[in-house]
């Protein structure tokens, strides 16, 4: 039963290795900070999370869903960041729902704020 999840984890690790460095994708970026408020149904509280990226970080902008029952879930900020860098925007806010198939649809979501510093 845990097998599917382990396979998913190995795939995610591989994706992370395949992603390459931030510097290769966004050479003009000095740092990226993603602050988010993670909301999971049933927990009844919000968890703040902050993720930092630097030129030497893996360009893997997918945030894991924290729900135990979630399969292949997560919040992919790749498109958000790509659009921001393309327009040289320094900040953006938005919301994303988990992409995974969990115990219930809409089981978790994040409200995020992205800050990008350019070199
Ligand atoms: Zn999820």
Image (cartoon, rainbow, N blue to C red):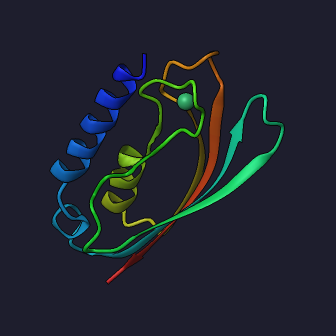
Q: Is residue 45 left or right of residue 17?
A: right
On the image, which quarter does residue 58 sit in?
bottom left
Q: Nearer the viewer, residue 94 or 64?
A: 64
Relative to 2, say whether 117 is above or below: below
Residue extending farthest right? 44
Q: Is residue 29 left or right of residue 108?
A: left
Query: Residue 68: where, in percent of width, then height?
Result: 58, 31
Residue found at x 56% / y 20%: 102
Residue found at x 27% / y 45%: 13
Q: Is residue 38 left or right of residue 45?
A: left
Ligand 1 occupies quarter: top right
Relative to 61, say whether 101 is above or below: above
Q: Nearer the viewer, residue 73 or 54?
A: 73
Residue found at x 35% / y 20%: 4
Count of labels shown?
A: 0
Q: Nearer the viewer, residue 25 or 14?
A: 14
Relative to 65, say whether 18 is above or below: below
Query: Residue 29: where, in percent of width, then height?
Result: 31, 73
Query: Residue 119: where, in percent of width, then height?
Result: 31, 84
Relative to 15, say whether 2 is above or below: above
Residue found at x 39% / y 26%: 5
Query: Residue 49: where, in percent of width, then height?
Result: 61, 58
Residue extending farthest bottom? 119
Q: In the rendered image, which quarter contains the N terminus? A: top left
């Amino acid at each position: 039963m845990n097998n599917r999840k382990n396979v998913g984890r190995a795939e995610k690790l591989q994706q992370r290795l395949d992603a390459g460095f931030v510097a290769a994708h966004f050479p003009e970026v000095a740092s990226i900070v993603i602050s988010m408020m993670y909301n999971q149904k049933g927990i009844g509280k919000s968890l703040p999370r902050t993720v930092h990226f630097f030129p030497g970080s893996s360009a893997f902008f997918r945030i894991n869903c924290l729900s135990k029952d979630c399969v292949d879930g997560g919040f992919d900020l790749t498109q958000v960041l790509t659009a921001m860098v393309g327009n040289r925007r320094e900040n953006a806010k938005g919301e994303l729902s988990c992409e995974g198939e969990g115990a219930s649809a809409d089981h978790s979501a994040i409200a995020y704020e992205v800050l990008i510093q350019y070199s």
